[in-house]
Image: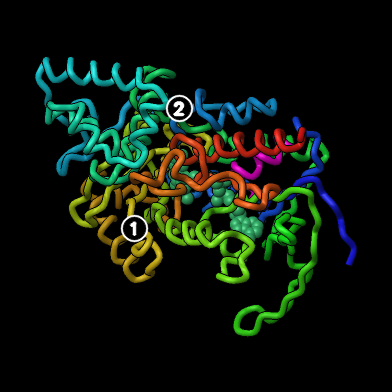
């Protein structure tokens, strides 16, 4: 068996894996190989050009990026010399109150004193130190508000903002540390508690440059490569096993052959719920300590599920000039939090002239997203909700595609699952095995969390190279 040796193998070509690969190749002069099981790079941020018909371009589900130009994913691209072209930012969040959409600022009626109290509260959040925020990583926003926010109206507005950040409806379930961290960094950078943008090139506009850097610096990206195993010997990651041949029998009778690719270091940049497919989790034979395996098993389904529709309309359903993000805390028929974005209002290239592209979803639990029958039932109810929210929807509809995803954006932002409570970036006892992605240590909303963890993971590798 011929062995080809790389300095670094990265499993997963999402933003996190591409980011680590790009920094290691460019700054660390490492010979990098990135492997992904899909035919394209981008992971959960892929875009499909010309889909479902010529002139349209859809992303995997609804994506807006917190902070846009000032985001960690921009910093990651700039670090390796690439630029992301951002469209206009979302000027408002319109929340459905059961009858109509209202600007989030008007949703909660406030007296002059309450408005001043809210403004003062934002000032206080902006001044919180990182250490003060960390203390709240395993406590809820409700508890933080009990100590810091006496006014019911101000509490309600902060809860609404927290819901948009975390996709969790109740303040008792939101990690205070995460909401405060996101609000603080938005306030310091853009003087708003939350701001989101969409790249002109769609989600691929964020990852394309990273892939280019890997190739420009002598690295390789191998697609359609479903990694079977991280090979660990004597407490050291020595490489990966990948399929070497595709056999005809793959359904009931699976024949397989694999080849080994050697490397000095390995990064797992695939979602946490896939880890047990490439690392032995069996008690007794796992190379990783029991406490680590148990922790990953415990949290692997603490992820957000989404179901929704991507749809195109023959003519505008809403004002094409309106840069808006729609949300609802709880829909009448389906009963879940809702989000929607008319993407073509942010990047006209995604739809043919005069038409409109929408990405929508409801935020559900893992059990609902993974059960086909429950999913179909909820999608039908969600469509009823949408007909009420967007009059003229059925008449103007050109096409619609239902979708679901189980594990959209890393760990749910509940107390005890954020900040330093997230899994570490290095494997215990196996120092040349690293992790990166939205599930691992790194702050910010999903894409930015993944970008942050990617930069931190790359820094660990660069540090270890100097040892
Ligand atoms: C529908 C949807 C909507 C979202 N909306 C938002 C949003 O509005 N804002 C936001 O910030 N975030 C959003 N997110 C989350 C965001 O897309 C993710 O947090 C981010 O893309 C995660 O990047 P990653 O690199 O950690 O993981 P991924 O992008 O999942 O990359 C992991 C890669 O590993 C590969 N892989 C897995 N197993 C193997 C294997 N055995 N061998 C080889 N390769 C393998 C996968 O193919 C994948 O390409 C959304 C996600 C979805 C799905």
Q: Which residues are magenta?
A: 12-24
At 55% across and 32% down in the image, what residue appears?
A: 73
Q: Is residue 23 magenta?
A: yes
**Mark 1 to mark 2: distance in Å?**
26 Å
Q: Quadrant of residue 318?
A: top left
The quarter of the image holding the C terminus is top right
Left or right relative to 370: residue 393:
left
Residue 57 in sight: no
Under circle 1, the secondary element is loop
Q: Quadrant of residue 233?
A: bottom right
Callout 1 crowding tier (Cα within 10 Å): few <14, some 14–19, many ≥20: some
Q: How many marks?
A: 2
The residue beneath circle 1 is 365
The residue beneath circle 2 is 67
- Looking at this view, is 182 or 99 the one in front? 182
Measured from the top left, where is residue 241 in percent x and y?
Answer: 74, 64
First of labels 1, 2 by sequence position: 2
- Residue contact between numbered discs 1 and 2, judged by CB atoms under 8 Å: no
- Above or below, 216 against 173 in this view is above
- Above or below, 437 against 334 in this view is above
At 50% across and 58% down in the image, what residue appears?
A: 291
Q: As drawn, which residue projects farthest toward the right? A: 2
Under circle 2, the secondary element is loop
The quarter of the image holding the N terminus is bottom right
Q: How is the image coloured?
A: rainbow
Residue 192 in sight: yes
Measured from the top left, where is residue 246 in percent x and y?
Answer: 74, 72
């Amino acid at each position: 068996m011929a062995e080809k040796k790389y300095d670094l193998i990265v499993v997963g070509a999402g933003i996190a894996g591409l980011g680590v690969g790009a920094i290691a190749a460019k700054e660390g002069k490492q010979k990098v190989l990135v492997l992904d099981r899909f035919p394209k790079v981008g992971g959960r941020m892929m875009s499909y050009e010309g889909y479902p018909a010529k002139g349209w371009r859809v992303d995997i589900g609804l994506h807006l990026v917190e902070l846009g130009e000032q985001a960690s994913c921009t910093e990651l691209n700039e670090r390796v010399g690439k630029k992301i072209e951002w469209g206009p930012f979302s000027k408002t969040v319109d929340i459905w109150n059961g009858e109509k959409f209202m600007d989030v600022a008007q949703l909660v009626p406030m007296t002059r004193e309450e408005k001043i109290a809210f403004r003062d509260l934002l000032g206080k959040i902006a001044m919180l130190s990182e250490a003060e925020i960390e203390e709240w990583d395993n406590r809820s926003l409700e508890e933080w508000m009990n100590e810091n926010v006496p006014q019911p109206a101000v509490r309600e507005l902060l809860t609404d903002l927290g819901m948009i950040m975390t996709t969790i409806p109740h303040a008792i379930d939101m990690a205070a540390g995460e909401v405060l961290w996101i609000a603080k960094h938005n306030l310091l950078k853009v003087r708003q508690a939350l701001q989101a943008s969409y790249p002109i090139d769609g989600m691929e506009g964020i990852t394309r440059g990273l892939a280019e850097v890997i190739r420009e610096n002598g690295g390789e990206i191998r697609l359609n490569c479903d990694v079977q195993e991280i090979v660990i010997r004597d407490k050291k990651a020595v490489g990966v096993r990948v399929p070497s041949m595709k056999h005809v029998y793959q359904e009931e009778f699976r024949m397989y052959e694999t080849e080994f690719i050697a490397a000095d270091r390995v990064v797992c940049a695939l979602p946490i719920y896939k880890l047990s497919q490439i690392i032995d989790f069996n008690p007794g034979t796992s190379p990783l300590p029991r406490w680590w395996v148990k922790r990953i098993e415990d949290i692997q389904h603490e992820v957000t599920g989404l179901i929704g529709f991507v749809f195109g309309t023959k003519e505008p359903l809403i004002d094409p000039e309106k840069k808006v993000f729609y949300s609802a805390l709880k829909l009448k028929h389906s009963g879940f939090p809702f989000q929607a974005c008319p993407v073509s209002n942010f990047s006209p290239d995604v739809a043919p002239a005069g038409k409109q592209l929408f990405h929508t979803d409801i935020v559900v639990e893992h059990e609902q997203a993974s059960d086909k029958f429950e999913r179909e039932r909820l999608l039908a109810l969600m469509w009823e909700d949408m007909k009420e929210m967007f009059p003229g929807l059925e008449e103007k509809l050109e096409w619609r595609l239902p979708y679901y995803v189980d594990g959209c954006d890393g760990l749910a932002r509940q107390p005890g699952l954020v900040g330093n409570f997230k899994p570490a970036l290095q494997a215990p006892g196996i120092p040349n095995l690293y992790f990166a992605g939205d599930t691992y240590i790194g702050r910010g909303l999903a894409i930015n969390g993944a970008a942050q963890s990617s930069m931190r993971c790359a820094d660990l590798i660069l540090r270890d190279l100097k040892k």
